[in-house]
Image (tube, coloured by chain):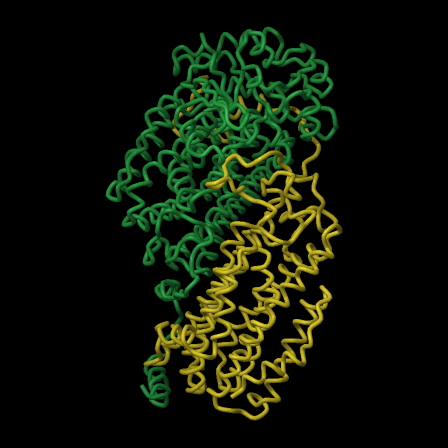
Chain colours: A yellow, B green
């Protein structure tokens, strides 16, 4: 039989080819170790599929901690800067490949979740519209708050999304890179869901402006988002250290500003204004926030702050970064307080005591989840007091 | 419209039509271009000599959730096939052993490219100013994660279910030992991520993906299938569906810089360098994996190369970009010569260095030798005779004490590594176009095998300083290097790599290598 085969003959099903192949196969497997990446240290008791498919895909040499390769880079940037280098961050690690997404999501699991959310979103919107629920929505809330300010908040999410681009390029680990891309995609998903809600409202409410013009004007020129816009721009474009980008965005700004805006403003207040639509989208964003929190606390608390060799140094550096980014975030929140003057007041809901209680929830959560684990001391009462001075 | 009137309108609209309403992905996407805003310090962190236009569009207009839906559907089909029918028919144990070994390399090395492309497209996402263009690159970032996982899944599947797990199960650790690895890093790792952002895009999207993924990801499925492997077509063809988006991204990159004066000045030089960089490795390596890593042959590599690289890419694809001033690379002519002999030259060297691999290599059988001679007249006189000599000296037998590397030393045929491509070559025994050029810089000697790489180095030597395996291992005994690089099977003594796939043949151990006392030397020091 000729060894050149044509016409799409397949070795698995063509009897003549299959006979030749089977005759060549060893009677017994040549190797008993069948676990891929058997040499690695798993996070749990056994190496899981996520670890098999993601870990040690990063081809860094051993002088970048965790790498298995040797030697130099085969091509460098113009001028000789290396492809990846320890100098890309002030943080230090004994093993840049240690991070794990607590949900162990590799690509297939990640897109499966999001695809389900998309299908459910489509079904929900159809039911919502057919049910006529939009009729109960307060018109000021709908046209001014959702039309303008929720739209403007979409730019905050979009800017944070963009801050992940250089992280995806520069970070020093495989699981870090994949996690950073996924939490970046979640942020642009948030921005797109906000526009989706506005487009949906425009379909249901004749005259509701779908365009991004008014929200963009609010975001770029208005007073309510001035502080947040500046922080987002600084994280996105002025920060080069990829760890600082993740820390400032996900350990300071978003747990405080993002959480207050999403959970304590749009989600909490919407039901008081007859809005059952916005919580549907916000709760998806909150799911992403929760997943991101798991990822970034693993990066910064479980890996960097607990690093045997560099934990103390890393913790001190996180304190420095917190000192830098916390005042900016407080300013962003303070500016955002101006929004309460734009909405019809509801006693016990939008008055000062209710806002203070909401701020307390956010700051308590932040202290518990982000500050305490690294021993960062912040006078949250004083911070809240500062934020409240922004109320008109 | 007044607020109260709007509410009334909504109520009236509902009275007329209660049909369910939703929002499609395109209805959201059409606003994407307005998601960004201007501010003083809005610029990329990665410099480029080109300027990407602010209004560049993308061809695949996806939003995050629609992307996920589309990929999820493809995953269901792919993993369904792998985990269901292919497992039930024990497909991994019905692959020809030679091809089982090839997939250790092909899948893992493609994984390297996919992985680095995550970072590369992250850089492009940062560099682009138009939100749609950013969105296109973002989709590719996610795709590349998918492909990294998929390539890993091939090795994972073969390790778990196949006939020889060694090499599949630890490729990410053992790949760094041998002579093919550094060249792989040049084309599929550093070439994608280190440099001018647009230059990297040209390497990745315009050449790597638009040119070489066709033979690497599409043609390979025919070879796999002929040799009994249905896992690779299942996964790789699913990967290829995403590659269309990546080629479109490359096209849009060129569109975005088409009106920039820098494009007419630099684009064709960057394209020529990128093409030569990619072809210098892939032309010989793919040809070697296909022809020498299979039992059943689909067609001579030179024909595959001519169809996909020369005609489809160099002619049609680049032709379409002609209106933007893009020309076929000047180095395409020399590459066409490489497509005939370079893979035969490389196999000879790879086989000579077989103990440093993480896979088993096999010398051509008599019927394969006939096939080579029929398709590459002159093959026997150059290569076939030598392989007969090596076989006669017992190169497959661990008791022989003979490594083919000794033949090169005995016959005074030194093997060098090209500094720019990191591809090994033997200028005194090759039919390809390699010629030795040696230059000295900063007290160190550098060897080159062709004018195109030499030119790149002469322009920017600081970009190509990486030591090669002979410099790295100089003075060290071969078995030490193998043990340190974890090139052993789970019994702790048998090598992962072997010089045959004969099921009745003996397997070489570390002791067999140690007895030969092969010590590495740097050929440049002898000059």
Image vertical order of residue A200 relative to residue B107, above or below: below
Give percent across and percent down for residue B99: 53, 27
Q: Where is residue B54 in the image (x, y as percent from the top left)?
A: 34, 58
- Which of B101/A183 is in front? A183
Is residue B300 visible from the viewing direction of this image?
yes
Q: Tell me the residue at 44%/80% (across/down).
A: A131
Could you tell me which residue is drawn at 59 percent across and 59 percent down?
Answer: A244
Instruction: Provide residue B151's location: percent of width, then percent of height.
Output: 54, 40
Q: Where is residue B233 in the image (x, y as percent from the top left)?
A: 47, 37
Q: Which residue lies furthest to the front in this view?
A: B442
- Residue B189 position (above or below residue B46): above
Using the image as rendered, state which of residue B328 and residue A197 is in the foreground. Answer: B328
Quadrant of the rendered image containing residue A347 = bottom right
Query: Could you tell me which quadrant the N terminus of chain B lies in?
Result: bottom left
> Quadrant location of residue B263?
top left
Taking the image as drawn, is residue A15 in sight? Answer: no
Count every numbered label the image shows and give the total. Answer: 0
């Amino acid at each position: 039989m000729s060894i050149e085969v044509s016409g799409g003959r397949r070795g698995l099903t063509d009897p003549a080819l299959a006979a030749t192949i089977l005759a060549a196969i060893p009677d017994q497997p040549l190797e008993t170790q069948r676990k891929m990446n058997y040499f690695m240290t798993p996070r749990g008791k056994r190496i899981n599929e996520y670890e098999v498919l993601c870990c040690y895909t990063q081809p860094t040499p051993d002088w970048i901690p965790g790498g298995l390769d040797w030697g130099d880079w085969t091509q460098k940037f113009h001028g000789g800067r290396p492809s990846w280098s320890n100098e890309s961050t002030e943080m230090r690690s004994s093993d840049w490949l240690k991070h794990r997404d607590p949900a162990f999501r590799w690509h297939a699991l990640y897109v499966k979740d999001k695809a389900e959310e998309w299908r459910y979103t489509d079904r929900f919107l159809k039911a919502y519209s057919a049910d006529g629920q939009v009729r109960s929505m307060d018109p000021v809330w709908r046209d001014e708050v959702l039309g303008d300010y929720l739209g403007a908040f979409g730019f905050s999410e979009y800017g944070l999304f963009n801050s992940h681009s250089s992280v995806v390029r520069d970070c020093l680990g495989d699981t870090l890179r994949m996690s950073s891309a996924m939490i970046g995609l979640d942020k642009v998903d948030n921005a797109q869901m906000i526009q989706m809600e506005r487009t949906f409202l425009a379909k249901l409410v004749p005259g509701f402006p779908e365009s991004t013009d008014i929200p963009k004007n609010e975001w770029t020129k208005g007073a309510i988002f001035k502080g947040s816009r500046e922080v987002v721009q600084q994280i996105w474009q002025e920060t080069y250290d990829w760890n600082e980008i993740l820390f400032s965005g996900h350990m300071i700004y978003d747990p405080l500003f993002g959480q207050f805006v999403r959970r304590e403003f749009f989600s909490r207040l919407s039901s008081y204004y007859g809005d059952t639509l916005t919580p549907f989208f916000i709760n998806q964003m909150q799911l992403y926030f929760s997943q991101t929190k798991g990822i970034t606390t693993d990066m910064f608390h479980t890996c960097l702050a607990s690093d045997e060799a560099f934990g103390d140094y890393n913790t001190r550096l996180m304190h420095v970064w917190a000192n830098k980014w916390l005042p900016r975030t407080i300013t962003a929140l303070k500016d955002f307080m101006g929004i309460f003057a734009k909405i019809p007041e509801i006693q016990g809901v939008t008055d000062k005591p209710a806002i203070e209680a909401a701020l307390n929830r956010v700051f308590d959560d932040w202290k518990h989840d982000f500050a305490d684990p690294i021993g960062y001391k912040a006078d949250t009462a004083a911070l809240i007091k500062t934020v409240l001075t922004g109320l008109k | 419209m007044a607020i109260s009137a709007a509410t009334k309108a909504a109520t009236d609209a509902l009275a007329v039509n209660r049909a369910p309403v939703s929002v499609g992905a395109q209805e959201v996407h059409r606003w994407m271009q307005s998601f960004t805003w201007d501010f003083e310090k809005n610029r990329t962190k990665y410099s480029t000599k080109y300027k990407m236009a602010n209004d560049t569009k993308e061809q695949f207009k996806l939003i995050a959730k629609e992307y996920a839906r589309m990929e999820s559907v493809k995953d269901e089909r792919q993993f369904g096939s792998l985990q269901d029918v292919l497992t039930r028919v024990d497909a991994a144990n019905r692959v020809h052993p030679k091809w089982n070994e090839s997939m250790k390399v092909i899948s893992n090395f493609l994984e390297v490219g996919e992985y680095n492309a995550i970072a590369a497209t992250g850089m492009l996402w940062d560099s682009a100013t138009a939100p749609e263009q950013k969105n296109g690159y973002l989709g590719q970032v996610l795709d590349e994660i998918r492909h990294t996982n998929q390539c890993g899944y091939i090795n994972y599947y073969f390790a778990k279910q196949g006939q020889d797990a060694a090499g599949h199960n630890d490729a990410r650790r053992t790949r760094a030992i041998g002579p093919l690895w550094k060249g792989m890093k040049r084309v599929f790792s550093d070439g994608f991520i280190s440099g001018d952002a647009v230059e990297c895009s040209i390497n990745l999207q315009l050449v790597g993906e638009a040119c070489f993924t066709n033979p690497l990801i599409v043609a390979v499925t025919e070879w796999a299938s002929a040799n009994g492997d249905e896992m690779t077509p299942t996964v790789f063809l699913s990967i290829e569906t995403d590659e269309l988006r990546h080629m479109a991204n490359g096209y849009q990159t060129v569109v975005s810089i088409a009106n920039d004066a820098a494009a007419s000045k630099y684009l064709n030089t960057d394209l020529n360098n990128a093409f030569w960089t990619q072809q210098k490795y892939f032309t010989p390596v793919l040809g070697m994996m296909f022809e020498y890593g299979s039992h059943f042959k689909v067609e001579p590599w030179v024909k595959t190369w001519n169809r996909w690289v020369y005609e489809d890419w160099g002619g049609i694809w680049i032709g379409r970009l002609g209106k933007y001033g893009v020309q076929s690379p000047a180095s395409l002519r020399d590459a066409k010569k490489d497509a005939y002999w370079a893979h035969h030259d490389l196999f000879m060297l790879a086989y000579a260095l077989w103990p440093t691999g993480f896979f088993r290599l096999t010398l051509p059988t008599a019927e394969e030798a006939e096939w080579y001679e029929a398709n590459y007249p002159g093959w026997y006189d150059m290569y076939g005779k030598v392989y007969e000599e090596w076989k006669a000296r017992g190169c497959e037998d661990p008791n022989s004490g003979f490594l083919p590397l000794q033949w090169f030393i005995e016959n005074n045929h030194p093997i060098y590594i090209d500094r720019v491509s990191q591809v090994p070559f033997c200028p005194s025994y090759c039919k390809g176009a390699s010629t030795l050029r040696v230059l000295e810089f900063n007290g160190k000697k550098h060897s080159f095998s062709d004018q195109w790489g030499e030119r790149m180095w002469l322009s920017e030597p600081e970009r190509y300083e990486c030591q090669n395996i002979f410099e790295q291992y100089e003075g060290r005994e071969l078995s030490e290097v193998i043990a340190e690089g974890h090139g052993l099977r789970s019994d702790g003594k048998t090598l992962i790599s072997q010089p045959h796939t004969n099921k009745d043949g003996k397997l070489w151990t570390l002791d067999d290598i140690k007895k030969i006392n092969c010590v590495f030397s740097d050929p440049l020091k002898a000059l």
